[in-house]
Image: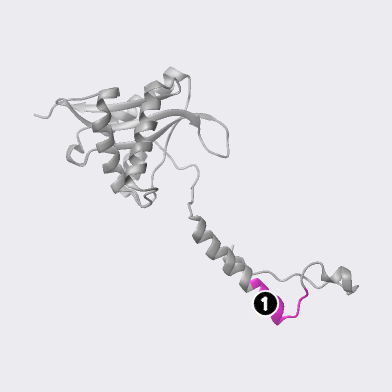
């Protein structure tokens, strides 16, 4: 018979287990920001601050005395477009060795309870599109998609934007379209601007 899952607020003495769970969560992340030691220190600081903050709650799930999951709950916005208050669920993770014991649902129940306590009507969870299991889990609980957040590195943006600019310049040269500003100096009639293909936007 499996031990029951209970939830409670995290305590400072839980920090080693919390960081172990974070490392497990990080292993599944497609974008590992920062070096591991630096990121670990920053995460420890963030968790310690969350334990002290009145606008956040770090909740853990336990089973048979083992800490098997966690979620960080903070008061935020439902979306970056509509400024509607919501409880944001981040750092949600259940240890691989303790999946399918109800820990995930117990943590979501804790999020709903915290939302009611704070007088907030919505709970938001961020899920990677490629994580089918997590998407199915949240969909079964009534979570629906609102916005899609796309992420790009600055270096990738520079490469793409440079390519668009270079192609537009090449088209202008081939069609002998003067650069913006040269028409006023020369007194010639303006020529319709040529832009890069829409598919590059």
Q: Nearer the viewer, residue 70 or 162?
A: 162
Residue 30, image x, y percentages: 36, 52
> Residue shown at 48%/55% (left/top)?
153
Residue 160, image x, y percentages: 54, 64
> Residue shown at 22%/38% (left/top)?
95
Q: Nearer the viewer, residue 180 or 109?
A: 180
Residue 149, image x, y percentages: 49, 47
In the image, is 188 to the left or to the right of 37?
right
Q: Which residue ends up furthest to the top in the rendered image?
A: 117
The kind of secondary structure element at disc 1 is helix
Note whether 83 is above or below 190 in the view shown.
Answer: above
Note whether 186 is above or below 26 in the view shown.
Answer: below
Find residue 164 and report its image quarter: bottom right
In the image, is 194 to the left or to the right of 103?
right
Note whether 201 is above or below 52 in the view shown.
Answer: below
Query: Magenta stretch containing residue 77, yes or no?
Result: no
Find residue 65 and report its image quarter: top left
In the image, is 82 to the left or to the right of 97?
right
Label 1 CA crowd tier, 10 Å (few <14, some 14–19, many 20+): some
Residue linked to disc 1? 171
> Residue shown at 29%/32% (left/top)?
70
Quadrant holding the C terminus: bottom right
Query: Magenta stretch containing residue 169, yes or no?
Result: yes
Q: Which residue ends up furthest to the left in the rendered image?
A: 1
- Give the magenta part as a residue range: 168-178
Residue 111, image x, y percentages: 37, 27
| Magenta stretch, main secondary structure class | helix
């Amino acid at each position: 018979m499996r031990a029951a899952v209970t939830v409670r607020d995290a305590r400072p003495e839980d920090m080693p287990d919390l960081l172990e769970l974070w490392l497990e969560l990080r292993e599944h992340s497609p974008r590992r920001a920062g070096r591991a030691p630096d990121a670990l220190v920053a995460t420890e600081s963030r968790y310690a601050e969350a334990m002290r903050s009145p606008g956040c709650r770090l909740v853990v799930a336990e089973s048979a005395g083992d800490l098997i999951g966690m979620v960080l709950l903070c008061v935020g916005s439902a979306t970056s477009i509509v400024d509607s208050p919501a409880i944001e669920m981040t750092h949600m993770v259940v240890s691989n060795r303790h999946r399918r014991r109800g820990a995930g649902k117990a943590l979501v129940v804790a999020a709903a309870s915290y939302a009611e306590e704070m007088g907030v009507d919505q709970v938001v969870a961020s899920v990677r599109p490629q994580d089918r299991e997590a998407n199915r889990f949240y969909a079964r609980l009534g979570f629906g998609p609102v916005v899609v957040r796309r992420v790009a590195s600055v270096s990738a943006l520079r490469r793409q934007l440079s390519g668009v600019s270079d192609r537009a310049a090449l088209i202008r040269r081939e069609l002998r379209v003067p650069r913006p500003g040269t028409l006023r100096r020369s007194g010639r009639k303006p020529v319709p601007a040529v832009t890069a293909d829409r598919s590059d936007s």
